[in-house]
Image (cartoon, grey):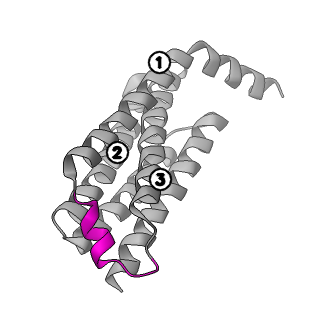
Amino acid sequence: MRKWKRELDFAAANAASLGIAAFLAAMGGVLLWVSGGSGWYLVKTAGRDVPSVAALFTLSLAVCGFCGLFEALILAWGRAVCPMRSVWPSACCAAGAYLAHLGWYAAALCTRMTLFGGILAIAAVVLTAAARLLLRRPPVLLTAAALALLAGESCFVTVTFSRIL
């Protein structure tokens, strides 16, 4: 119980930086979706198995926000608990997962390279898992953010390969 209280106090003390990171990452995803403008192609070519563009946009917004939160939690936790040189590989994997997720939209919807988009979606899942596994004794909040992120990214893998098959 003390560990939970300590972790919640830590999150409350860093709430501003965590919130700003999540917001900025989500806005990066929004800017990509708005400037990409290729959601119509998914609607035109998708079967009944693929969710609507609005559902994919909402899920992508949540995944981008959790990517920012995950990255901020890694950096804030690392700065407070352990030397930064042991946190950098995990932070780089988390940043790579965010970029792979953004690349999924560009590859799968904008350039119509669905297979490459699927590879990027799998890379995002693998990098998120690697970022979580590289940390020693991470807080429960960080693990929860990683699990939420893995669930969202797995949905994009499923959507991508359901379009291919």
Q: Name the residue under label 1.
A: 17
Specify few, some or many for label 1: CA neighbours under 10 Å numbering under 14, 14-19, or 20 or more: some
Residue that label 2 marks: 98
Segment colored magenta: 38-49
Q: Which of marks 2 and 3 is in front?
A: 3
Q: Where the N terminus falls, by quadrant? A: top right
Q: What element carries label 2?
A: helix
- Whole-angstrom CA distance, mark 2 to mark 1, is 18 Å
Quarter of the picture containing the C terminus is bottom left
What amino acid does circle 1 point to? Ser
Residue 94 point in image, percent of width and height = 39, 42
Q: Which residue is drawn at 50% across and 24% down?
A: 19
**Considering depth in this image, is 123 or 151 the residue closer to the camera?**
151
**Is 43 placed above or below 125 here?**
below
Give the residue furthest to the bottom: 165
The one nearer the camera, 85 or 49, is 49
Looking at the picture, which amino acid does disc 2 mark?
Tyr
First along the sequence among labels 1 and 3: 1
Location of residue 6 in the rendering, given as x and y in whole percent from the top left corner: 72, 20
Quarter-wise, where is residue 71 in the image? top left
Residue at mark 1 to residue at mark 3: CA–CA distance: 23 Å
Distance Cα–Cα, label 2 vs label 3: 14 Å
- Residue at image position (19%, 70%) is 113
Residue designated by label 3: 59
User: Do the CB atoms of the residues marked 2 and 3 lie less than 8 Å apart?
Assistant: no
Q: Is mark 1 on a helix, strand or loop?
A: helix
The single residue placed furthest to the top in the displayed view is 13
Residue 62 placement (x, y as % from top left): 48, 45
Q: How crowded is mark 2: few (under 14 residues within 10 Å), some or many (20 or more)?
A: many
Q: As shown in the figure, which amino acid type bears the numbered disc 3?
A: Leu
